[in-house]
Amino acid sequence: MALDIGSKTIGIALSDRTHTIASPHSTIARGKWQKDLESLKSVIRAEEVGMILLGLPLNMDGTEGPSCQAVRQFARNLQKDSELTDFPIDFWDERLSTSAVERAMIAQDLSRSKRDAKIDAAAAAYILEGFLNRLRNQHSNP
């Protein structure tokens, strides 16, 4: 499971069991922490998720700013939950993921309203696809 954490929404993407395909799943409108957590745990249980990959919004020069700190705090908050204490959580550089996804959606001639409704989950899928590609490359090039 990959998450694109924003201040207003959380985009969710999942991979298939063979870790070949990353697909957009859904978007959660952010609210109170406990509500967001329960929504995420519901997906984790229903989809039998084995790890959480969080998009890390690094600055273009590779440094971490306030947005990265917020994502890292989100991860710490996840691990405070008794069900997720030992759950594997990792981070993935998400620089330019949203803009890459938006360009692809524009190329598909999606209206602004359709892009807005789908972009966060699509960005999470883009993040997850990068991670899955790295896993495939590590296995094929020992």
Image (cartoon, grey):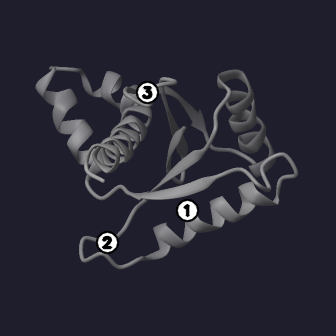
Q: How far apart are marks 2 and 3 (CA)?
A: 24 Å
61, 141: nearer the viewer: 141
- Say what amino acid the circle numbered 2 marks: Asn
Q: Residue 59 carries which label?
A: 2
Q: In which quarter of the image is residue 39?
A: top right
Q: Quadrant of residue 94?
A: bottom left
Q: In the rendered view, does 136 fall on the left or right side of 14?
A: left
Label number found at residue 71: 1
Residue 94 sits above or below residue 98 on the image: below
Residue 24: mark in rendering = 3
In primary-sequence order, the first of circles 2 and 3 is 3
The residue lying at 54 percent from left, 57 percent from top is 90
Q: Is mark 3 on a helix, strand or loop?
A: strand
In this rendered view, identify the residue nearer to me: 137 or 7: 137
Left or right placement of residue 95 versus residue 88 in this view:
left
User: How dense is the environment of label 3, judged by Cα within 10 Å: few (below 14), some, or many (20 and up)?
Assistant: many
Describe the element under mark 2 as helix, strand or loop: loop
